[in-house]
Image (tube, rainbow, N blue to C red):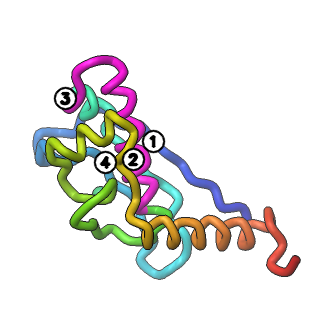
Amino acid sequence: MLSRIFLIFLPPPSSSLTSIVCGFALLPVSGGFGVTANVFAERAKEMGGSTESLRMILGNLMAHELGHLLLGQSGHSVAGIMRAQWRTQELQRAVEGTLFFLPEQAQTIRAQVLARMINSGTLPAHR
Ligand SMILES: [Zn+2]
């Protein structure tokens, strides 16, 4: 089975969504791998100043939503790229390229990518 991930850029959300929502990932209810992450790209414009800042923030928003898929959970952490709401310090670190996953999150993501590769036949289970 092939395990692909889709990252979709959506137009600005409707007014019914709160202004702090930057995206969402679709996680399966009964196990398995989530494959679809969505980002409201326009939100990066609202958070960033320069074009370079916008690029970095958008990249970090993408990583955050992909993180939900690869962590297999919709929850957030109190620090790092998976924080629910980015404060000024997270935005600054995003622009600087120093906003990361927490070490345990990075470990989970590596294991998840390996499991997806084995599941898809990209990598044999026993080498
Ligand atoms: Zn999130």
> Tag 3's secondary structure?
helix
Residue 115 lies in quadrant: bottom right
Identity, as a three-letter code, of the amino acid under mark 2: Asn
Residue 32 lies in quadrant: bottom right
- Which badge, 1 or 4, comes first in the chain's sequence? 1
Could you say where residue 51 lies in the image, as x and y percent from the top left? 33, 18
Give the numbered dot on residue 23. Answer: 4
- Which badge, 3 or 2, comes first in the chain's sequence? 2
Spatial CA distance of label 3 from label 1 is 19 Å
Q: Within 8 Å of ligand 1, the CB of disc 4?
A: yes
Q: Indicate which quadrant contains ligand 1.
A: bottom left
* Residue at image coords 43%, 67%: 103
Name the main secondary structure of what is drawn in magenta.
Answer: helix
Point out the frontmost of discs 4 and 3: 3
The residue carrying pointer 1 sits among few (fewer than 14), some (14 to 19) or many (20 or more) residues within 10 Å by Cα, namely some
Identity, as a three-letter code, of the amino acid under mark 4: Gly
For disc 2, the marked residue is: 38
| Image position of 116 with respect to 100: above or below | below
Q: Looking at the image, do the residues carrying marks 4 and 2 touch, with CB atoms under 8 Å apart?
A: yes
Q: Looking at the image, do the residues carrying marks 2 and 1 touch, with CB atoms under 8 Å apart?
A: yes
Give the numbered dot on residue 46. Answer: 3
Spatial CA distance of label 2 from label 1 is 5 Å
- Which badge, 3 or 1, comes first in the chain's sequence? 1
- Which badge, 2 or 1, comes first in the chain's sequence? 1
Spatial CA distance of label 4 from label 3 is 14 Å
> Tag 1's secondary structure?
strand
Identity, as a three-letter code, of the amino acid under mark 3: Glu
For the record, the magenta segment spans 46-68
